[in-house]
Image (cartoon, rainbow, N blue to C red):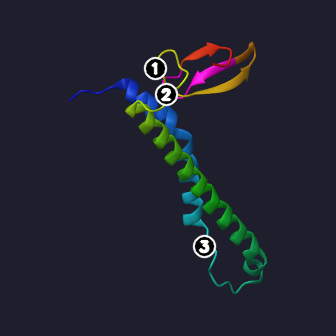
Amino acid sequence: MDINATTIERNFRLYTLPGLLALLGGGVLLLIDSSAESTGLFDQMIAPLKRGIFWMAAGLTLVGLAWALYRAWLEFRWMQGQLLGGCANCGGPVRHLDGRYGPYSKCLMCGGKRNGWH
């Protein structure tokens, strides 16, 4: 069995934030019951708030899942050789950022950084 640490690191970098968003939204969806009938006065007063939180959590879950699917599509295209990226190390897609010392590009696949936008 061959363990590729680079692949593990790349997948961690690509899917951590979308996965955390989806898990956070899903956890809130499990905790909040928006359709429960409430008999108490306080429960009736916060029912609209509970429904709003429920729908915001559902949206957060969908955004996290859509983001993860987009990242998976980028990784699939990169592995097939169809994605022409700007990284000098691996050829992966880069994002353009502004840092303390000016603009730079950071690869989404390997994490490599270069000065300027490429």
Q: Does the segment drawn in magenta span residue 118?
A: no
**Amino acid at pointer 2:** Met
Report the side of 1 relative to 19 (left or right): left
Question: 40 or 18: which is nearer to us?
Answer: 18
Structural distance between the alpha carbons of marks 2 and 3: 39 Å
Q: Position of residue 98 (x, y in %)?
A: 74, 22
Q: In front: mark 2 or mark 3?
A: 2
Q: Which residue is mark 1?
A: 90
* Residue at x 49%, y 27% (from the top left corner): 109
Span of residues in magenta: 104-111
Q: Quadrant of the C terminus?
A: top right
Asked if the residue under mark 2 is in contact with the one under mark 1, i.e. CB atoms within 8 Å, the reply is yes
- Membership of 107 in magenta stretch: yes
- Disc 1 marks a residue whose amino acid type is Cys
Which is more N-terminal, label 2 or label 1?
A: 1
In terms of sequence position, does the residue under pointer 1 or pointer 3 come before the other? 3
Pointer 3 residue? 33
